[in-house]
Amino acid sequence: MACFVVSAAAGIGVAVARHAVKHSEKKKENAGIAPKIEKFGSDTKWSKKLAYLELMLFAGSFILAIEHIIHGEIVPFPPFFTAIGEGEAIGMLKEMGTVGVAMFGILVAVWGIGVLVSDYIKYKRRKALPEAKKEGAK
């Protein structure tokens, strides 16, 4: 019933981390420190990669919340979760700890694989370019 709360909380944590990483990237950019383009995975900024994870977490959480509202498991009046009113609070916490954490782990794994594949494809394309084009791209 409340498995989506884990993804929403993780989304908030990722949003905070993304803002910190973005601040760090701007600080390095203002200092004139540029990432090495030839290095694997350095083409896309980490703040953008984290933004994709944040979007995935919040979108999944929103969709699950809507599904729970449609099925009547969440109501617009206190205690909001119908399981709490039925004395099932422990079962709800158990679901959050099992289903919610498992969904979060799978989602992060899928995001990580997507980031690795994307970075690998960009790295291979950049490595295949002739030296004249590489110099012009910088």
Image (tube, helix red, strand yellow):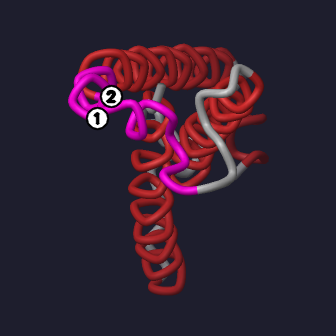
Q: Residue at x 61, y 37 (%)?
A: 74
Which SS type dominates the magenta stretch? helix
Residue 8 vs 63, above or below: the answer is: below
Whole-percent x, y for residue 138 in the image: 69, 52
Whole-percent x, y for residue 98 in the image: 26, 17
Where is residue 97, by image quadrant?
Answer: top left
Residue 88 magenta: yes
Kindly identify the amino acid type of the residue bearing the numbered disc 1: Ala
Q: Which residues are magenta?
A: 78-96
Whole-percent x, y for residue 133 in the image: 77, 35
Q: Residues within 10 Å of mark 1 (few under 14, many from 20)?
A: some
54 sits left or right of 89 in the view: right
Residue placed most toward the observer, 82 or 50: 82
Residue 108: assigned label: none
125 sits left or right of 97 in the view: right
Q: Residue at x 49, y 15 (%)?
A: 110
Residue 25 vs 9, above or below: the answer is: below
Helix, strand or loop at mark 2: helix
Residue 51 magenta: no
74 sits left or right of 3 in the view: right
Tag 2 and tag 1, C-beta contact below 8 Å:
yes
Q: Residue at x 52, y 25 (%)?
A: 115
Residue placed most toward the observer, 33 or 85: 85
Q: Residues within 10 Å of mark 2 (few under 14, many from 20)?
A: some
Kindly identify the amino acid type of the residue bearing the numbered disc 2: Met
Residue placed most toward the observer, 125 or 1: 1
The residue to which callout 2 is attached is 92
The residue to which callout 1 is attached is 89
Where is residue 10, by image quadrant?
Answer: top left
Residue 55 vs 130, above or below: the answer is: below
Q: Residue at x 39, y 56 (%)?
A: 13
